[in-house]
Image (cartoon, rainbow, N blue to C red):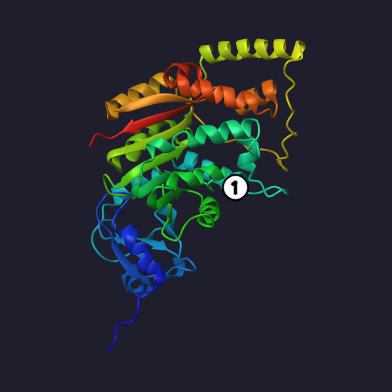
Amino acid sequence: MNAPMESPALTRFRILHDIVCCPITKTPLRIVDLNGLGSDLAPGEHRRLPAGTVGAFISDAVNRAYPFSARIVSFLDRDALHTRTGSSDPGLTARAQNAGGEVKQSVQEWYDLFGWKKNEQGVYYDTVVFSQIGPVGHGLYELMSHLSILDRLRGGQFVLDAASGAISPPEKLAYSWFYKSRVCVDMSVTALLEADAKLRDWDFCCLADVCKLPFRDETFDGAVSGYTVQHVPESQQAAAVKELYRVLRPAGHLCILTEVAHSELHELFFLLLRAFAKMLKVLGLFRPVQPPPPQTGNERPPLYCVLRPLSWWRNMAAELTDTFSIESLRILTKHEFEWLFGSSDKPAKCLRLLESFLPGLVSRFSPFCVIDLGKPA
């Protein structure tokens, strides 16, 4: 008698099974289909089984099952199901659940209820607030800065996109060009549903906490974290960076794109640039194209954010590796760029040229930097 055929979803997630682990204990996980999950669940847990579940990763170390649908797996505490196999340490589980919970929930709600919702033009509110729509002016400036890290993402089996969001702006899709599988991690299911629609068949979406990643040591050939650490609870930001570095393979690069605490040098640079731009306008040599006012559609709620100075990032990088660099990503914020240059393209190109030629020097007064952490082979 022939054995029943395995579902395509389960076959697909077997690829991910090779690299995942328990987010709490870092021990291996079992993979089961829906029938196997049903026999493993503790009494009363069947009613919590999410609709569309086709299987689960099971941690016998902490009596937990992490369910997955056809496209998304959840490693979050809130979605974990209790099983009746193995033994667990309740104290360990409780400590993992309580760490920074209120801040993380507030950030998740900001993106679920606002950031990854769309306005009447079909644009994410996150994009409206933090980016300029379209590849002009600041939008072009941002696009070029994001693509500047591609030479560090050299290809391989897996690339990690930590706190991927909805993969917006779209140029971030380029980060997986040279990899067989992209693994997007985020705490927002709204974000991952949007991201999944843009991914390839052998890419994956995982609901997970960046402070306790569900991946084995030295798993990813490359990793990117865009504007993530600044929204992690202040007391856990160092732990988040260490987690991202832990899962990086030797010879790989971890690129952290982040806003840093603004320095006095930045304020001085902006004043000088402001005076120069004003002089050009008076002489009639430059007329900026003013961007349309942002249409957010509703009031912008507060978003938790703690920016670290450049010195903190240097110390953090030096603690992990001798192979690191800190370079300028963008010299100006969105507000500063638009205030000076509107939607003009030439200033964007000139600024990127300056940042490319003197990345280390310019980083000293840049509000946005890329922290490149290499892991020696």
Q: Is residue 348 above or below residue 99?
A: above
Q: Nearer the viewer, residue 128 or 289?
A: 289
Please name the residue that numbered disc 1 is placed on: 116
Say which quarter of the image contains residue 6: bottom left
Q: Is residue 88 above or below residue 331?
A: below
- Looking at the image, residue 366 sits to the left or right of residue 9; the answer is right
Percent across and percent down for residue 157 are: 33, 51
Residue 332 visible in the shown view: no
**Residue drawn at the location 58% of the way across and 22% of the way down:** 350
**Residue drawn at the location 31% of the way across and 59% of the way down:** 17
Percent across and percent down for residue 298 are: 71, 42
Q: Is residue 274 above or below residue 22?
A: above
Percent across and percent down for residue 241 are: 36, 35
**Which quadrant: the N terminus?**
bottom left
- Looking at the image, residue 160 sits to the left or right of residue 376; the answer is right
Residue 37 visible in the shown view: yes
Element under label 1? loop
Percent across and percent down for residue 232 are: 45, 36
**Residue drawn at the location 62% of the way across and 40% of the way down:** 127
**Which quadrant: the C terminus?**
top left
- Which amino acid, by three-letter code, is at mark 1? Trp
Estimate how packed mark 1 is, as few (under 14), some (14 to 19) or many (20 or more) residues with alpha carbons within 10 Å. Answer: many
Q: Nearer the viewer, residue 70 or 30?
A: 70
- Looking at the image, residue 360 sits to the left or right of residue 91; the answer is right
